[in-house]
C-alpha cells in the first residue's frame, strides 16, 4: 500500500521567541504544504530535494527520527514541499507531521491527532534542542490558533484576509537564534522578561481583534511585535527592508515570522492591496508569496 499525507506550514502573527519562555503566541496554518508519500519496501529510503539516503541524521534528521521513533518496518518515504526550507514557515514541522501522519495510516498505528502533534513536538525538540509546540500543533490541527505552552491550544476564527510572505532567501537557523536570545536573557533577564510580557499581551489583545476580523488593528500590533523582535536581536537589515516595503505598499502590518536572522516576513493585507504589497517586497529584493490561512491541518490519502 502507498499512503500520501500532507501538512501545512505556518506563520506567526505574535509570539515567536516569547513562546519559548512560556508566553502565549498566535500562529496560523497557511496554504503551503509538505507532502510525504510512504510505502512498505524491503529497504528504508528517504528521498527529498536534499537527495536519497537511508536513515541518515546528517541529511534527513527529522524524517530519520520519525521512522525510528515509531519503530516501523522498512519503508520508503518521499518528501515534496511547497514550503521554503529554513525560512520560519515551519517546513520541518510540516515534514515531520506529514511523515508521522503517513506512517500512522500506512502501518495502522491508530495515533489520534493530539498524539501525532505530541510525538512531532518531541521529534522537533530532539533534533533541534529546543522547540515550542507551536509549529507541530498548528501543522496538525490547521487553522489560526492561540498557543499557551504547556497549558492549552485553541482554535480562533480563521484569518480571512490575504497573507503576503516575503522571503529574504537568507538561511535562518532556529537553533542559533534561540541560543542568541537565551544569552540575551541570561545577560539582561529583567529587560528580556519585560519584552516577553509585552509580546504575551499582544497575543492576548490580538484574540478579540482576530475574532472581530479587525485586521487593521491586528496589523498595528504586528508592527509593534516586529519592533520588539528587532530589540531582542533577531532582526536584520533585509528583514526590516521587506517589512517597510510591505507597510509602505499598504499592508495592515508586517513583521518577522519565526526565528528571524534571515527567513521570512509576513504581512496582512486587504485582498485589493495584496498584489502591490507583493510587488513592493519583490522590488526590495525579497521573494513574495501571496497566500491565505488554511483551516485544514494534516490530511491523509491512502492508495492501494
Ligand atoms: O523559524 P521557525 O519556524 O522554526 O520558528 C521558530 C520560532 C521560535 O519561537 C523562535 C522557536 C520555537 O520553537 O517556537
Image (cartoon, grey):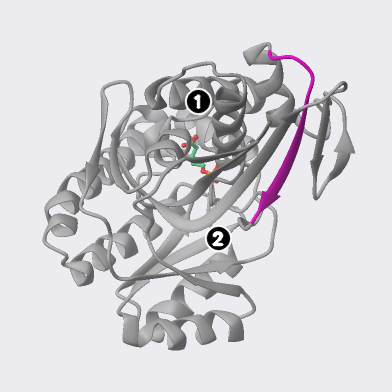
Which quadrant is home to the C terminus? top right
Where residue 208 appears, as percent x and y from the top left, is 11, 53
Which secondary structure dominates the residues rendered in magenta?
strand
In this rendering, the count of numbered labels is: 2
Q: What residue is at 45 percent from the left and 27 percent from the top?
A: 117
Residue 136 sits above or below residue 284 on the image: above
Front residue of this view, candidates 116 and 165: 116
Left or right of 157 in this view: 175: right
Whether residue 80 is in magenta: the answer is: yes
User: Which residue appears farthest toward the front when viewing the image?
Assistant: 304
Q: Nearer the viewer, residue 271 or 1?
A: 1
Q: Is residue 187 left or right of residue 43?
A: left
Reading the image, the residue beneath label 1 is 121
**Residue 53: which quarter of the image?**
top right
Q: Which segment is the magenta one?
A: 72-81
- Residue 264, label in figure: 2
Residue 92: give x, y in percent of width and height: 61, 40
State the residue at coordinates (45%, 86%): 275
Amino acid at each position: 500500500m502507498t499512503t500520501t499525507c500532507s501538512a501545512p506550514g505556518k506563520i506567526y502573527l505574535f509570539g515567536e521567541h516569547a513562546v519559548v519562555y512560556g508566553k502565549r503566541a498566535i500562529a496560523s496554518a497557511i496554504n503551503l504544504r509538505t507532502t510525504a508519500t510512504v510505502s512498505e519496501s524491503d529497504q528504508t529510503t528517504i528521498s527529498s530535494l536534499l537527495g536519497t539516503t537511508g536513515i541518515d541524521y546528517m541529511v534527513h534528521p527529522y524524517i530519520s527520527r520519525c521512522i525510528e521513533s515509531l519503530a516501523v518496518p522498512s519503508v520508503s518515504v518521499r518528501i515534496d514541499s511547497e514550503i521554503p526550507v529554513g525560512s520560519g514557515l515551519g517546513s520541518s514541522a510540516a515534514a515531520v507531521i506529514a511523515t508521522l501522519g503517513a506512517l500512522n495510516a500506512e502501518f495502522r498505528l491508530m495515533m489520534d491527532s493530539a498524539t501525532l502533534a505530541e510525538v512531532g513536538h518531541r521529534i522537533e525538540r530532539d533534533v533541534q534542542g529546543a522547540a515550542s509546540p507551536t509549529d507541530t500543533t498548528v501543522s496538525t490541527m490547521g487553522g489560526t490558533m492561540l498557543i499557551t505552552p504547556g497549558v492549552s491550544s485553541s482554535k480562533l476564527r480563521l484569518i480571512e484576509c490575504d497573507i503576503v510572505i516575503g522571503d529574504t532567501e537568507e538561511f535562518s537557523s532556529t537553533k542559533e537564534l534561540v541560543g542568541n536570545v537565551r544569552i540575551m536573557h541570561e545577560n539582561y533577564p529583567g529587560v528580556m522578561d519585560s519584552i516577553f510580557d509585552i509580546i504575551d499581551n499582544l497575543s492576548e489583545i490580538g484574540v478579540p481583534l482576530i475574532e472581530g476580523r479587525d485586521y487593521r488593528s491586528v496589523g498595528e500590533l504586528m508592527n509593534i511585535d516586529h519592533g520588539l523582535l528587532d530589540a531582542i536581536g533577531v532582526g536584520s537589515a533585509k528583514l526590516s527592508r521587506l517589512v517597510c516595503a510591505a507597510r509602505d505598499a499598504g499592508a495592515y502590518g508586517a513583521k518577522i515570522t519565526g526565528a528571524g536572522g534571515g527567513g521570512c516576513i509576513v504581512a496582512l493585507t486587504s485582498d485589493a492591496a495584496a498584489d502591490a504589497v507583493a510587488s513592493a517586497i519583490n522590488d526590495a529584493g525579497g521573494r513574495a508569496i501571496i497566500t491565505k490561512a488554511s483551516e485544514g491541518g494534516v490530511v491523509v490519502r491512502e492508495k492501494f
